[in-house]
Amino acid sequence: MQKKTQSKETFFKYIVTLRWPQVARNRSVETLQERPDIVQEMNHFREKLERVCKLILKKEHKIEDKFHISGVKILFESGQDLYEFIVRQPEFEWEIHPHISTINSLTGEYKTFDLVYQPTGFIVV
Amino acid sequence: MQKYTHITLVGNISIDYDYKWCNKLGDIVASGDINKPLNTKFSITNNESELQRMINNINLKNSIILTPLTLYKKYLFFNNVDYLPSFPDEQKLHIDIDSCSTQLLSLLCSIWCEYDKVFLFGYNIEDLNERELLIRVAANNPHIQIYYCRKPNANKIKLFDHLPNVSVMDYKEFKKYAEENTK
């Protein structure tokens, strides 16, 4: 039984961080404690993100529950899904930090690459 | 099954050999693109057009395709493409992983993965540079046992006699070894 559960475990190879909406950026924990409206906005943002991810992504993904001041961490199983997510940012008025982290399936190394936007698309450097 | 201890390396020379016993014995690493349904754990290339063919090769659907970091950045969004680790021998032997042969990369990768026994099939040693690098890599890694596998041949190869960790084995001997070790 345990073996079955283990084999179903998903390997999330790609990680990106999606910035919070403008109103919630660069806010300290103290500010957030005093401003429930911003917290509500952040919660709505997360909910919308979850809904849209369910709609547009074909394979498994995971939205981290932990609070990060920089944004929401999203883990992707599929590179094609991540590509789709990056390409469709303007459609949902999202903005990711221009970095993609990957976990090497051979070495287990976690490495971050920069994403550079260009007039014709984007490249990874 | 000797997973994690035995690995078969499919070199750059195409040979007519059924890799059934290699599959039973352990993992298989392919150098470049392959045209037969091998159950390879890794397949390695440093050539972009070959990488594109490998991504679309149904035979490599379940294989991890390893490539140098420079090439990986261009193909990062393909799930089964990953980058090669940095090998300790790379500096010592002045190997440029972006331009060296894929069979050498496969050998370095197998050694990096710490497989105890590496079986070389279709490994090109006619190229003097390749031969020299194989000897130097073997000498640098005396804890890894390397078997150069070839067709049964009455002529003996004496190239590796000075290396205690390199042996020559023919296909019959390999089959016998595999049968004994997979029981």
Image: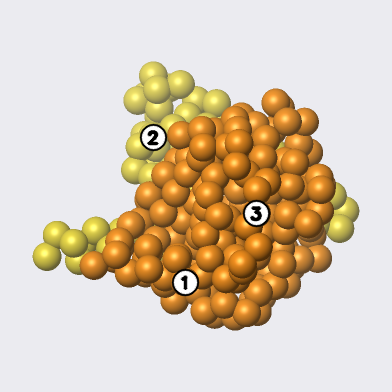
Q: Nearer the viewer, residue B118 or B174?
A: B174
Residue in the picture at 65% in, 54% down: B157
Q: Is residue B64 left or right of residue B180?
A: right
The circle drawn on residue B26 is none
How far is the residue under mark 2 from the one under mark 1?
Answer: 61 Å
Residue in the picture at 47% in, 71% down: B172
Query: Chain under label 2?
Result: A
What element does badge 3 sit on?
A: loop
Q: Chain B hue?
A: orange
As drawn, the residue found furthest toward the right would be A119
Mark in front: 2 vs 1: 1
Query: Chain under label 3?
Result: B
Residue tagged 3 = B157
Residue tagged 1 = B172
Q: Amino acid at mark 3?
A: Ile
Q: Is residue B110 left or right of residue A36?
A: right
Q: Is residue A84 left or right of residue A44?
A: right
What element does badge 1 sit on?
A: helix
Q: Quadrant of the N terminus of chain A?
A: bottom left
Q: On screen, A101 above or below B39?
A: above
Residue tagged 2 = A67
Q: On screen, B24 above or below B144?
A: below
Colour yellow belongs to chain: A
Q: Nearer the viewer, residue B26 or A66?
A: B26
> Are labels 1 and 3 on one chain?
yes
As drawn, the residue found furthest toward the front would be B154
Q: Amino acid at mark 2?
A: Phe
Q: On screen, B115 above or below B152?
A: above
Residue in the picture at 40% in, 27% down: A32
